[in-house]
Amino acid sequence: MSGGVDSSVVAALAAASGAETIGVTLQLYDHGSAVKRAGSCCAGQDIRDARAVSDKLGIAHYVFDHESRFRDSVIDQFADEYLSGRT
């Protein structure tokens, strides 16, 4: 769950249908520096929003910290390729 409307509505529909439903959010950025920043996707306020929706729906919510893996596999590789003119 990103904390946005789309994932929240899908979670609500799944829960209302009787399906076993849980919320999962991947933390992809430094949570500390993004705590109050909205729309940063996958950190800070977005995690809080996803948890609040899950609480309201009565479903479990889990956050998995993949910040270092995302930085190493996506951000750093993109930056290297960008600097080499290959994007």
Image (tube, rainbow, N blue to C red):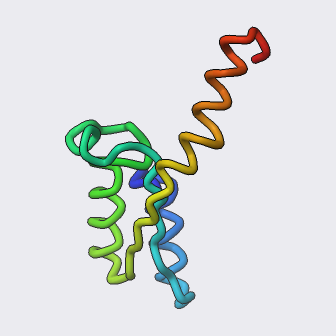
Numbered-mark total:
0
**Residue 4 shown left or right of residue 45 in the figure:** right
Q: Which residue appears at 41% of the width and 73% of the height?
A: 62
Q: Which residue appears at 20% of the width and 40% of the height?
A: 36
Foreground pick, 37 / 19: 37
Q: Measured along the vertical axis of the image, is residue 11 above or below residue 19?
A: above
Q: Which residue appears at 43% of the width and 54% of the height?
A: 27
Foreground pick, 29 / 60: 29
Quarter holding the C terminus?
A: top right
Q: Measured along the vertical axis of the image, is residue 75 above or below residue 59?
A: above
Foreground pick, 65 / 37: 65
- Residue 86 x %, y %: 79, 15
Q: Measured along the vertical axis of the image, is residue 45 above or below residue 86?
A: below
Q: Quadrant of residue 17?
A: bottom right
- Of all residues shown, which one is farthest toward the right? 86
Q: Measured along the vertical axis of the image, is residue 38 above or below residue 20?
A: above
- Of all residues shown, which one is farthest toward the left? 36
- Residue 49 x %, y %: 30, 56
Q: Which residue appears at 39% of the width and 54% of the height?
A: 3
**Residue 4 shown left or right of residue 44 in the figure:** right
Q: Quadrant of residue 47?
A: bottom left
